[in-house]
Image (cartoon, helix red, strand yellow):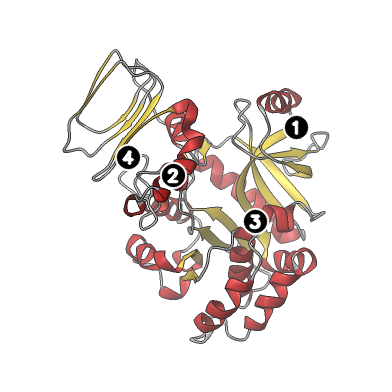
Amino acid sequence: MNKAPYVLIMAGGVGSRFWPASREHLPKQFLDITGSGKNLLRETVDRYLPFVPIENIYVITNIAYVALVRETIPEMDNDQIIGEPSRNNTAPAIALASFKLSKLDPEAVCIVAPADHVIHNEKEFQRIIDLAVKHASTNPSIVTLGIEPSRPDTGYGYIEFDKEETAEVFCVKSFREKPDKATAERYLKHGSFVWNAGIFVWRLNTIIADIKDHAPSIYELLIPGMPLFNTPEESDFISTAYPKTDKISIDHAILERSDNVYTIPCDISWSDLGTWNSLYEFLEKNDAGNVLLSDSIFMKAANNNLVISKKDKLVAVKGLDGHIIIDTEDCLMIYPMNDEQEIKALKEDLEKNGYKDYL
């Protein structure tokens, strides 16, 4: 890369499906979910530092988490942390940050990435990002990373690409919502579908043009802030204008409507860590199929479980198969893996029954 791109890290989510570890006051991007010794946001920043200087890395997060970002990335200037006054989904967040960065360099390439993904093959990841940056810098295009599917997963959105092309960067034909099992199996067999990783690469002037064309209401609300971005008046403008923007994802607002979207199918040992099951699939298992993230766990006739506990507490488990066991300072959750999609609804039930302090 001749000119270092910007990196925009999205770190404003709550991580509801990772309850009870992920809470409103401390969501999963600020947790050491994988046992690596670093939280997920720190891991994400460190992934880019070998080829992007820290001054080119920005984080957009909910205003309630700005202090947590500062604590996690102390070498980052305050101006590099963008606080959202409301949760309006990814399209307004990306639009806001793109306007702010474009004032610095409208022709710069920007990499947009979630803060809560893990990637083990970082050498291949860097090669793919370099390829995407080169494509975006010379073409008015949106480039997405497409993860080559290893199984017919129903938890991811899919990207259909034109597999007749011979280059590594393929034209996107369509985006597909999370499929049922039969459809996912058909996608896997067809060979022209990849998982949507939610990692995007584009020039700032390209994405802003697409926002103007495909999300004009967001554009019209934020464009008046151009004279104010990167000045002391920026925060007042954001606090007034941003909550009025449409609550819509970047996929629905831009990618599904644009005709200049490309994907790079890749195998980078990736997981979005969207659920406890995805963490279980990603981590190393013992001979009984258990993932044990603690020093003090005793298992007997127990198989295929995920167990996470405070390290100063002994956990003994017998007879369970295929369960999620999460033990925090104030909560213990034991849930069947097959029912993990209910965890988000479980939080709502707990709130209705007076347990809001535990959420």
Considering the numbered disc 4 on the image, is that residue within a helix, a strand or a loop?
Answer: loop
Q: Are marks 1 and 3 in contact (CB under 8 Å)?
A: no
Q: How far apart are marks 1 and 2 (CA)?
A: 40 Å
- Please provide percent x and percent y for residue 169: 73, 44
Inspect the image, locate mark 1, and give the three-letter code of the amino acid beneath it: Ser
Q: Label 1 belongs to which residue?
A: 192
Q: In which quarter of the image is residue 74?
A: bottom left
Of discs 3 and 4, which sits in the foreground?
3
Q: Are marks 1 and 4 in contact (CB under 8 Å)?
A: no
Q: Residues within 10 Å of mark 2 (few under 14, many from 20)?
A: few
Q: Label 4 belongs to which residue?
A: 35
Q: Residues within 10 Å of mark 4 (few under 14, many from 20)?
A: few
Inspect the image, locate mark 4, and give the three-letter code of the amino acid beneath it: Gly
Residue 101 in sight: no
Disc on the earlier residue, 1 or 2: 1
Q: In which quarter of the image is residue 73?
A: bottom left
Q: Which residue is pictured at 67% across the width and 77% down the height? A: 221
Q: Distance between the residues labelled 4 and 2?
A: 30 Å
Q: Label 2 belongs to which residue?
A: 349
- Please provide percent x and percent y for residue 113: 55, 53
Q: Distance between the residues labelled 1 and 3?
A: 24 Å
Q: Label 3 belongs to which residue?
A: 249
Q: Do the residues labelled 1 and 2 touch (CB within 8 Å)?
A: no
Q: How far apart are marks 1 and 4 (CA)?
A: 35 Å
- Residue 271 sits above or below residue 77 on the image: above
Judge by depth and name the residue closer to the eye, 277 or 123: 277
